[in-house]
Image (spheres, rainbow, N blue to C red):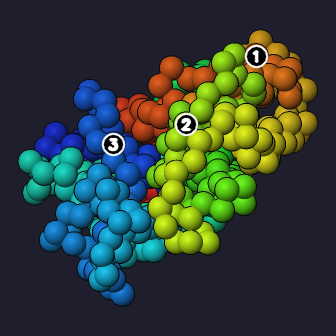
Amino acid sequence: MPSFFNSLLGMFSMDMGVDLGTANTLVCVGGQGIVLSEPSVVAVKKGTNQVLLNGDAVGNTAKVMLGKTPYGITAIRPLKDGVIADFEITEAMLSYFIRKVHNRRRLVKPRVVIGVPSGITQVEKRAVINSAERAGAREVFLIEEPMAAGIGVGLPIEQPVGSMIVDIGGGTTDVAVMSLAGIVEAMSLRVAGDEFDDAIMQHVKESYNLLIGPQSAEGVKHKIGSAVPMSQELEIEVRGRDAASGLPRKITLGSEEIREALSDPVSHILKAIRQILEQTPPELAADLVHQGVVLAGGGALLHGLDKAIEQEVELPTRVADEPLLAVATGTTKVLERLDLLSQILESGTE
C-alpha cells in the first residue's frame, strides 16, 4: 500500500504494538504507553471454540476461571512455549484485545507490530500474521522479542557495539547478542516462567503429596522464590488437595526448598547464556565486559537471578527498569520509526 495512503489511514487508526506472551499479552500505543495488560487466557464452551460472554471471556475475566470452571466450561491458554497452540482461540483473543484498544476507531483497521520468540519457525510466524490479520489488523509486522526488548529498555542496538539481553517470559527465554540493528547470536529456550511454576508444583507433590495449581505455584514463586540464598529466608502457607485422601490440606514451604526446586530450570537458562557468550565474536564479547547483560521479562524478577548470572559468566548484570514492559514498549518504539527500522521486521506482504 502506498505510503501516502498508509499515512492517511494512520491519522484515523490507533496503531499498536503487541507483546503476545504465553502468560500475558500487553498492548502499547504510541504516545500513550501500555494501554492493556491482561493474561493470555480464553474461556470457551467445552469441546468447542465458542468464546463465552459473546467473545469477551478473555484476559482477566477468563484467568479467574482457571482451575475453577464447572462442567461444560474450560479456561485455556492458546499459546504454549511462546507459539500458537490453538489458532482459532488465539485469533479470538487477539480480536478481543484489538477491539478493546481500537474500539473508537472501528472503521479503520490498525497496523500492528507483534513480538515473537527468536526461535519460532516460518510456519509459526505465518500463523501469528494470519491470526492478527483475521483479528482486524490492517498490516502486521513481526519483530523478534530480544530485539524488541533491547529497543524497549534503551540498549544501543543500532550502534556498532555489542549488547546482550536475556528476555525471560512465560513460555520462552530469549538470549541474544545484538549489534548494528541485527541479532548476531541468539537462542530461544523453552524454559521460562511456566517451567518455574511446574518445578514448584512437582516439588510440592513429591515432597508433601499435595496437589496445587499453577496460580498457587506462581504465588509461591513471586513471594519466596529465589536463584541465590536470601539475606533472610522466608516461609509461605500453601493450600491444595491431598493426593492420597483427596481432601483439602495446607502446608508451609520455605524459600530454601523452593530455591532447590527452581535450580534445574535456572541452570538451563545459565547454560544458554554461557553458550551464546562462547559463540559471540571476540570484538563484541569485549564490549560486553563494559555493557554487561540486561534482564527483561517477568522471569527477570526472580529474586537474585541477576546475581546468579553474574556468578556464572562474570559479567555485570542488571534487571531492566520495567522488565515486564520491555517487549511491548519496544514494539511501540518501532511503530514510531517504522520507515527507519523496517529492516528488522517481517511482514505478511513479503
Q: How busy is the neighbourhood of tag 3: few (under 14 within 10 Å), some, or many (20 plus)?
A: some
Q: Nearer the viewer, residue 317 or 279?
A: 317
**Viewer can see residue 146:** no
What kind of element bears circle 1? loop
Amino acid residing under circle 1: Pro
Indicate whether 24 appears above or below 180: below
- The residue positioned 64% from the left and 50% from the top of the image is 200
- Nearer-the-camera pick, 127 or 90: 90
Q: Is residue 164 above or below residue 2?
A: above
Q: Is residue 28 visible?
A: yes
What is the spatial separation of the Cα atoms under label 3 and label 2, in whole angstroms? 27 Å
The residue furthest top is 290
Q: Earlier in the sequence, mark 3 or mark 2?
A: 3
Rendered image: mark on residue 236: 2
How would you rate the neighbour count of disc 2 (Cα within 10 Å): few for under 14, some for 14-19, many for 20 or more?
Answer: few
Q: Is residue 193 above or below residue 52?
A: above
> In terms of sequence position, does the residue under pointer 1 or pointer 3 come before the other?
3
Displayed quadrant of residue 303 = top right
Name the residue beneath numbered marker 1: 316
In this rendering, which labeled residue sits more in front, label 2 or label 1?
2
73 with respect to 268 (left or right)? left
Contact check, label 2 and label 1, Cβ < 8 Å? no
Position of 75 compared to 7: left or right?
A: right
Where does label 3 land, which residue?
37
* Label 1 crowd (10 A; few <14 / some 14-19 / many >=20): some
> In the picture, which quadrant includes the N terminus?
bottom left
Q: Is residue 171 above or below residue 83?
A: above
